[in-house]
Image (cartoon, coloured by chain):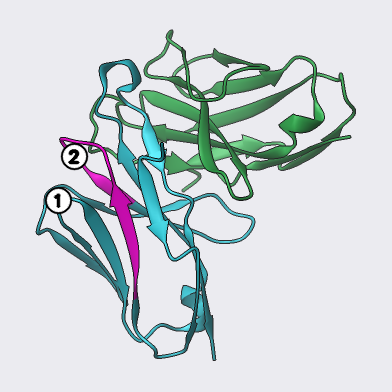
Amino acid sequence: EDQVTQSPEALRLQEGESSSLNCSYTVSGLRGLFWYRQDPGKGPEFLFTLYSAGEEKEKERLKATLTKKESFLHITAPKPEDSATYLCAVPSDRGSTLGRLYFGRGTQLTVWP
Amino acid sequence: NAGVTQTPKFQVLKTGQSMTLQCAQDMNHNSMYWYRQDPGMGLRLIYYSASEGTTDKGEVPNGYNVSRLNKREFSLRLESAAPSQTSVYFCASSEEAYLLNQPQHFGDGTRLSIL
């Protein structure tokens, strides 16, 4: 059973067209949620950590929010350089797997001019 | 800032050959990780090392071995490569694996093809 589910799998936006990506999770006792950006041929690049429900973080055109069951990555007026795969991850809450991150499969965002 | 450095970047092997993927970090992190990334599967943890001198299995450890050489370096070895191990391999590090709110930082991967 997937601990982290991301939707949509792929999203195409016109430059300037705002939208949101979703990350839902099933772990209880959330200790944090991470957002990453991954460009083709590169490793995931850390963007944000969210620690508690209601928290928001911003970076340029990106804003991440967190509720008790899901997180959203809002992209305002995107540009072609925002095209990438966005991953979210949550840490395991179980003793036997403590310290591991569960990753979603990602949302592939394409922003066209 | 180097961060996490992986070598080689690309490799082609024949079935049955062995090889070692190297990883080094310069952030003084205690914990290091090896993942594989396959289309449609996302990132899956192979092995991790919470601290120097310790290693633990992740989700998909079969066919792999690891060595935490020192605090900076963590290697992944394929003893007898199989086509199913064709993948992109990522190394990552974090301050402390058991500080659950600490992000992991990734290298740029090794693209491995096994014929």
Is mark 2 in CB contact (under 8 Å) with mark 1?
Answer: yes
| Image coordinates for residue B16, horizontal then vertical, percent | 87, 19
Q: Secondary structure at mark 1?
A: loop
Identify the subunit bearing mark 2.
A
Identified by mark 2, the residue type is Leu
Residue beneath the point at 47% across and 28% down: B33
Q: Is residue A56 above or below residue B84?
A: below
- Near-viewer residue (A18 or A8): A8
Q: Is residue A18 above or below residue B57?
A: below
| Image coordinates for residue B31, horizontal then vertical, percent | 38, 25
Q: Could you say which quadrant of the image residue B61 lies in?
A: top right
**Chain letter, green:** B
Q: Identify residue for label 1.
A: A68
- Near-viewer residue (A71 or A16): A71
Sooner in the amino-acid sequence: mark 2 or mark 1: 2
**What is the magenta range?**
A20-34
Residue beneath the point at 33% across and 56% down: A23
Are there few (<14), some (14-19), or many (20+) residues within 10 Å of tag 2? many
Palette colour of chain A: cyan
With B77 as the anchor, is A74 left or right in this view?
Answer: left
Q: Identify residue for label 2.
A: A30
Identified by mark 1, the residue type is Lys
Identify the subunit bearing mark 1.
A
Are there few (<14), some (14-19), or many (20+) residues within 10 Å of tag 1? some
| Image coordinates for residue B104, horizontal then vertical, percent | 38, 39
| Image coordinates for residue B43, horizontal then vertical, percent | 52, 41
Please say whether residue A32 is one of the residues in the magenta stretch: yes
Residue beneath the point at 20% across and 51% down: A69
Q: Could you say which quadrant of the image residue B38 lies in?
A: top right
Please say whether residue B14 is one of the residues in the magenta stretch: no
